[in-house]
Image (tube, rainbow, N blue to C red):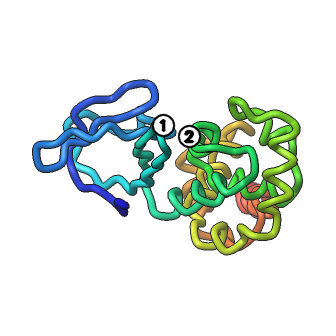
Amino acid sequence: MYEYMNGKITEIDSTYIVLEVAGIGYLINVGNPYSYSIGEDTKVYIYQHIREDENTLYGFHSLEEKQFFLKLIDVKGLGCKMALPILATGSINGVIDAIERENVLYLKKFPKIGDKVAKQIILDLKGKLNASASSAPIDNYDELIEVLQGLGYKLPDIKKVLPNIKTDTSIEEQIKDALKLMLK
C-alpha cells in the first residue's frame, strides 16, 4: 500500500497524470488533472485500489482529500470512479455542507450520482464529517470567494476581509459576516 509519492509530472490527460518516480512512470487517476503542470515536482497522496482484474492508483493533493475519498468509497453503491469527480470541485467543505444540510440537488450535480446514491451518501455520512470540515478552513474560503465574486465584489476587496471571517462556521454564516464587513 502506498501513502504518497514524490516525483515529476510527465504527462497529463483528462482523467489521469503520469508521475515519474525514480525512473518509473505511475499512471494515477485524479479528480482534476489540470491542477497539475507538466514538469512540476510534486507530492501526490495515493490510494491503491486492488481487485481481481484491476490494480489502479488514485491521487490527491492533500491527506485530507484522500481521507475524504476513503469515506466516500465506504458509502454503499459509490465506487472509486464515482467518488473521484466529487473531489474535482476542490471544495470538500462544500460537499460536506451539502451532506449535513441534506442537499440532494447539490450532490446530484456530480456525474453518475443520481437521487438514490445522493440519499445514500447523506444517510451514511451525515454527522460523521464535522471533524474534517473544521480541519480545512482554506477550502471554505474558496467557496466564499466564489460567492462574493458572483455578487460583484472584487478579489482585492474580498481578500481584505478574509482574515476577519471565522473559519469554524457554516458557509452561510461566513457569507453574512463577509457582507457585513464589505459594507463597512
The residue carrying pointer 1 sits among few (fewer than 14), some (14 to 19) or many (20 or more) residues within 10 Å by Cα, namely many
Q: Nearer the viewer, residue 82 or 168?
A: 82
Relative vertical location of residue 166 with respect to residue 97 in this rendering, above or below: below
Location of the C terminus by quadrant is: bottom right
Identify which amino acid the numbered label 1 is placed on.
Answer: Asn
**Numbered disc 2: secondary structure:** loop
Q: Earlier in the sequence, mark 2 or mark 1?
A: 1
Residue 166 place in picture, x, y as percent? 68, 72
Identify which amino acid the numbered label 2 is placed on.
Answer: Ala
Q: Residue at x 32, y 37 (%)?
A: 27
Location of the N terminus by quadrant is: bottom left
Residue that carries the numbered disc 2 in the rendered image? 88
Residue that carries the numbered disc 1 in the rendered image? 32
Q: Is residue 69 left or right of residue 116?
A: left
* Quarter of the rendering containing residue 18: top left
Q: Nearer the viewer, residue 170 or 147?
A: 170
Q: Residue at x 70, y 34 (%)?
A: 110
The residues tagged by marks 2 and 1 sit, at their Cα atoms, a distance apart of 5 Å
The residue carrying pointer 2 sits among few (fewer than 14), some (14 to 19) or many (20 or more) residues within 10 Å by Cα, namely some
The answer to whether residue 9 is seen in the rendering is yes
Relative vertical location of residue 102 with respect to residue 118 in this rendering, above or below: below
Q: Residue at x 60, y 62 (%)?
A: 162
Q: Is residue 67 left or right of residue 95?
A: left
* Quarter of the rendering containing residue 13: top left
* Quarter of the rendering containing residue 168: bottom right
Residue 6 place in picture, x, y as percent? 24, 55
Q: Residue at x 82, y 44 (%)?
A: 118
